[in-house]
Image: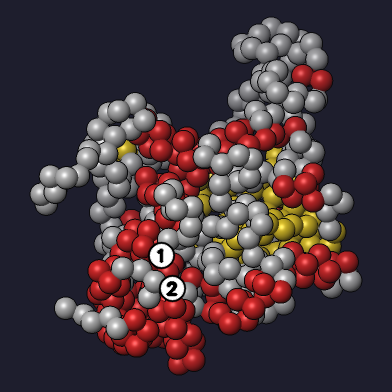
Amino acid sequence: MMQSSNHVTLTTADGESVTDDNNSLSTGPAGPLLLTDYKLIDKLAHLVRERIPERVVHAKGSGAHGYFEVTHDVSKYCKAKFLDSVGKKTPVLARFSTVGGERGSADTARDPRGFAVKFYTEEGNWDMVGNNTPVFFIRDPQKFADLVHTHKRNPETNLKDPNMFWDFHSLVPESLHQLTVLFSDRGVPKGYRHMNGYGSHTFKNVNAQGQAFWVKYHFKTDQGVENFTQEEAQRLAGENPDYAQKDLLEAIADERFPSWTVCIQVMEYEDAAKYKWNPFDVTKVWPHKDYPLIPIGKMVLNRNPENYFADIEQAAFSPSALIPGIEPSFDRVLQGRIFSYADAHRYRLGTNYLQIPVNCPYATRVATHQRDGFMTIDGNQGAAPNYWPNSVEGAPRPDTSRTDVTPYEISGIVGRHSYTHPNDDFEQPGVLYRQVMTPEQKTRLINNIVGHLKNARKDLQERMVVLFTKVDREYGARVQEGLQEASGFKSH
């Protein structure tokens, strides 16, 4: 496609031209990403330094302490010690949040909700950093900074901008699944206690015998899923913008402890290459009829933080916090987050953010060769050496008796590859619309989309009608009809 002559060339911060801004460098279409992709790092590293001092995303949040209890034997699927016996309990910290709003924004905004859980295990902290939706807007982290920008404020006006939002999404069809969820009833949960949580990504679980499985994590609310209508949400945004935080705080204070049943979906390792959808594409779900939910435990929140800033604002969750038995997969967005989240914490909280009590892996002994830096508060590990190899008696040294990553083979030509697995971005949101939603839920979905999309330019409305029609003819027709009624939109 010819570029218009009035377009300027996209570059990195160093001024080098960008040839492909959609695909990260990977080892073949299905292989892992490369740290040498300095253009990806350029985008991600800059993104997480754009706000001071609040989080770039997930700025408005609430949280509580509690525990996870194993209810079913899952040793067949994972060797992690915190899962090794039924009845075993592990302390946890959970943080829930909106995504696009600032710290002072309303809890009832139409937005995905962050759902992060820190497990303080004897092998180190494991952070399950997910959302209340099983899918995400994009499948490659190269698009992540752009996604965030379009959900934040226009740099010219400092206002939320429907044109930015719909311009981006109308050019990224992979976002249709998440958009259909976002504008459905589930777009505004009735507080944090009444929503599910999902790891969203695919992870690799490994058992004691070294056998690997692909796994997705689900946290199913025991309080039941409940949502606000758009009208209720807008009213509460003015009357009680902190509704979700107040609801969680008061429920725990009244000893109505919220809980979630934790389940996994398990795919045999060899099935990944032949499954009809790419199992590492975070814009897709694994239908439960193919991979049913397997219960593993229960999460209960039973203690409010003594100080919000100390325990919740300073809490730092990262997909890089892994333990033996739980490893990354080839999910590209997960791989990008492994770098980006920890980097954001170093920027926001300092290089020693893991010494802050709420983030400290206190259930195990930490012994590193890292020293100094702002806010070193642990004695700087005394006289222990800060280098390896060394011959100092009693100094920490690597555990050569095990591997921290299950060996796997990779091959391929390094380049900016898109996924070669069939990428039908319309089938799953179509199934959600036709087979899952009731007629009343469909009507609210259409009304919610039209209420937002009517504020965008006419050409963007047209683009989105085309995409919604590809998802489902009725879906597209009803959006078009609603736009015509709301703003006199006429299709071409």
Point 44% across, 78% down: residue: 451
Query: Relative to 128, is 298 on the left or the right?
Result: right
Point 20% across, 44% down: residue: 7
Position of residue 150 relative to residue 39, above or below, is below
Q: Position of residue 376 (x, y in %)?
A: 75, 23
Corner quadrant of residue 388 = top right
Q: Name the residue beneath numbered marker 2.
A: 452
Query: Relative to 174, is 393 on the left or the right?
Result: right
Q: Amino acid at mark 1?
A: Pro
**N-term-proximal mark, 2 vs 1:** 1
**Which secondary structure, mark 1?**
helix
Position of residue 207 relative to residue 12, above or below, is below
Between 353 and 334, the residue placed more toward the observer is: 353
Query: Relative to 207, is 246 on the left or the right?
Result: right
Q: How many marks?
A: 2
Query: Relative to 375, is 161 on the left or the right?
Result: left
Q: Residue furthest bottom?
A: 439
Question: How crowded is the residue under tag 2: few (<14 C-alpha within 10 Å), some, or many (20+)?
Answer: few
Q: Amino acid at mark 2?
A: His
Instruction: Give the CA separation, mark 2 to mark 1.
Output: 7 Å
Corner quadrant of residue 238 = bottom right
Between 364 and 473, the residue placed more toward the observer is: 473
Q: Position of residue 297 (x, y in %)?
A: 70, 64
Question: How crowded is the residue under tag 1: few (<14 C-alpha within 10 Å), some, or many (20+)?
Answer: many
- Give yes or no for contact between labels 2 and 1 (Cβ–Cβ under 8 Å): yes
Point 35% across, 68% down: residue: 456
Between 424 and 152, the residue placed more toward the observer is: 152
Q: Position of residue 420 (x, y in %)?
A: 25, 54
Q: Name the residue beneath numbered marker 1.
A: 162
Q: Position of residue 201 (x, y in %)?
A: 49, 56
| Quadrant (top left/top right/bottom left/bottom right) for the C terminus | bottom left
Point 71% across, 11% down: residue: 385
